[in-house]
Image (spheres, helix red, strand yellow):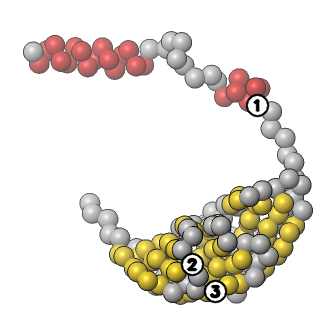
Amino acid sequence: MRLFLVLLLTGLIVGCATPGRGDPPSSTAFAEQLPIETVWTARMRGIDAADNYRLVPAVRDDVVYAVDGRGRVLAFANEDGERLWRAEVSSHVSAGPGVGARLLVVGTRDGRVYALDRRDGTELWRSRVGSEVLAVPAVADSVVVVRSVDGRVYGLDARNGRAFGCMIVRRRY
């Protein structure tokens, strides 16, 4: 019986590795089928060379939101790249932007969380968490969830930034 199972599993593994009609197309073939065109570009200030933050733009309702490490937050029309507004936060940004229905949220190296009105960049509130924010804040209708580098996850009231909960996340090895 054991020999039968070993042979069966070996056959399945070899069968999975055998080239056949289910092979994905090569990346070259895919690129030829889907032309990529640059529609617009925008320049952002960089961050200090020693930092290794990945500040990825967010898109919501045909608006692109981008942030640089020094605290500049910009909104662009997705269609043509026209700058809609510009705002500054007073700390070095380390995470974000997180975008919800009304809010755009960024986290900073010094443990601050800034919520801006995504329509015009007006600061709505700021809050303090235990340490540097490294993950993009998650924004919902009534709550903003932020994870800080010390392993804490905070629930912040989306209306005013007050913390209503905190949980410590520890890895078990």
**Is there CB contact under 8 Å for labels 1 and 2?**
no
Camera-side mark, 1 or 2: 2
Identify the disc placed on residue 149: none
Say which amino acid is labelled 3.
Trp
Left/right of residue 168 with respect to residue 172 in the rendered view:
right
In 3D space, how far apart are the residues under numbered discs 1 and 2 (Cα atoms)? 40 Å
Q: How many marks?
A: 3
Which of disc 3 and disc 2 is earlier in sequence?
A: 3
Nearer mark to the viewer, of 1 and 3: 3
Nearest the eye: 148 or 126: 126
Q: Secondary structure at mark 1?
A: loop
Up the image or down, 96 lies above or below 25; here it is below
Residue 158's tag is 2
**Residue at image point 77% right, 61% down:** 63
| In the displayed structure image, the side of residue 104 where residue 45 appears, left or right | right
* Residue 139 showing in the rendered view: yes
Q: For the residue carrying disc 3, how many other residues have a C-alpha within 10 Å: few (<14), some (14-19), or many (20+)?
A: some
Q: To which residue does mark 1 refer?
A: 34
Please give the name of the residue rendered at 87% of the width and 58% of the height, measured from the top-left corner.
81
Sequence-first tag of 1 and 3: 1
**Where residue 168 appears, x then y in whole percent?**
35, 75
> What's under tag 2, amino acid-wise?
Ala
**Residue 85 or 111: which is nearer the viewer?**
85
Residue 52 placement (x, y as % from top left): 61, 66
User: Which one is in front, 13 or 102?
Assistant: 102
Whole-number angstrom distance, CA of label 2 to CA of label 3 = 9 Å
Near mark 1 (Cα within 10 A), the count class, few <14, some 14-19 or many ≥20, is few
Secondary structure state at the residue bearing disc 3: strand
Give the crowd class for mark 2: few <14, some 14-19, many >=20 residues within 10 Å.
Answer: many
Closest to the camera, between mark 2 and mark 3, is 2
Q: Could one spot residue 149 in this view of the protein?
A: no
